[in-house]
């Protein structure tokens, strides 16, 4: 009897409501990944020592690419089909970094933070917008740096210049290594018995 009274009281309090019919379709809230608040939280969460930052060389040691060159890199073990999907822009970009108006020193720190942050948050595909630098005094400088730095980071499995609709030669799509936590979760789900 008390249970029925509680139900009636609840119905009276809530009023007319309709049940959600799209179970499993989460609400997606757009997030500005370059917002000052998020950038500052990212820096606080992923502290990088000066020694780690210094292993990525400055512009004087970076081999230069041309403004209209296509950037492309794939570690051994990355399947051809996976790399082809990355080249075609078929992976959803979950996080992005814009290097426009940054110096090489600033860009180096931001790239390192970005890559480590993406892996820490189990982001599989990200993008760095570096521009082509076609009409600059020092053409394709940031593009050359990104091309040289990314293969040196163990978290980067592959990268390729973005398709035209996603930034073209002025942006690079990156496929990140899974975090240790994500690898462990995948192993556990593989080992769990399947229900029929």
Image (cartoon, rainbow, N blue to C red):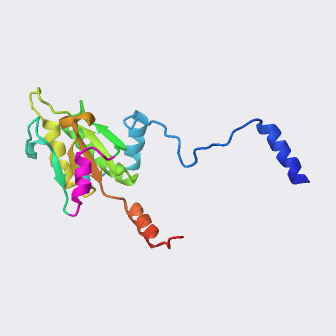
* Quarter of the image that includes the N terminus: bottom right
Residue 29 position (above or below residue 77): above
**Which portion, as a residue range, is magenta?**
77-91
Q: Quadrant of the C terminus?
A: bottom right
In terms of depth relative to the viewer, which is nearer, 140 or 9? 9
Count every numbered label the image shows and give the total.
0
Residue in the picture at 40% in, 51% down:
121
Q: Is residue 119 visible?
A: yes
Seen in the image, is 159 located left or right of residue 123? left
Residue at 34% in and 58% down: 178
User: Residue 19: percent from the left, percent from the top?
Assistant: 67, 42
- Expressed as whole percent of the image width and height from the top left, the position of residue 164 reads 22, 35
**Which residue is more in the foreground, 112 or 81?**
81
Q: Is residue 157 visible?
A: no
Left or right, 118 with respect to 20, comes to left
Residue 40 shown in magenta: no
Q: Position of residue 163 (x, y in %)?
A: 22, 39
Q: Residue most toward the right?
A: 1
Horizontal placement of 157 versus 65: left or right? right
Residue 76 occupies quadrant: bottom left
Q: Is residue 73 above or below residue 15?
A: below
Outermost residue on the top side: it is 135
Confirm whether the magenta stretch covers residue 85. Answer: yes
The residue depicted at 46 percent of the width and 67 percent of the height is 189
């Amino acid at each position: 009897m008390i249970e029925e009274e509680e139900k009636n009281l609840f119905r009276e309090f809530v009023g007319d409501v309709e049940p959600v019919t799209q179970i499993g379709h989460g609400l997606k809230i757009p997030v500005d990944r370059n917002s000052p608040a998020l950038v500052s939280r990212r820096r606080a969460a992923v502290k990088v020592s000066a020694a780690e930052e210094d292993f990525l060389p400055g512009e004087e040691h970076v081999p230069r690419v041309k403004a209209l060159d296509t950037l492309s890199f794939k570690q051994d073990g990355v399947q051809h089909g996976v790399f082809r999907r990355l080249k075609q822009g078929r992976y959803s970009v979950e996080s992005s970094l814009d290097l426009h108006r940054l110096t090489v020193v600033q860009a180096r720190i931001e790239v390192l933070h970005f890559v480590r942050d993406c892996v820490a948050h189990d982001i599989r595909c990200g993008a760095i917008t570096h521009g082509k630098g076609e009409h600059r005094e020092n053409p394709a400088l940031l593009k050359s740096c990104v091309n040289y730095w990314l293969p040196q980071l163990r978290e980067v499995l592959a990268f390729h210049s973005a398709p035209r609709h996603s930034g073209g030669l002025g942006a690079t799509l990156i496929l990140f290594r899974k975090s240790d936590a994500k690898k462990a979760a995948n192993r556990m789900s593989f080992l769990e018995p399947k229900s029929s």
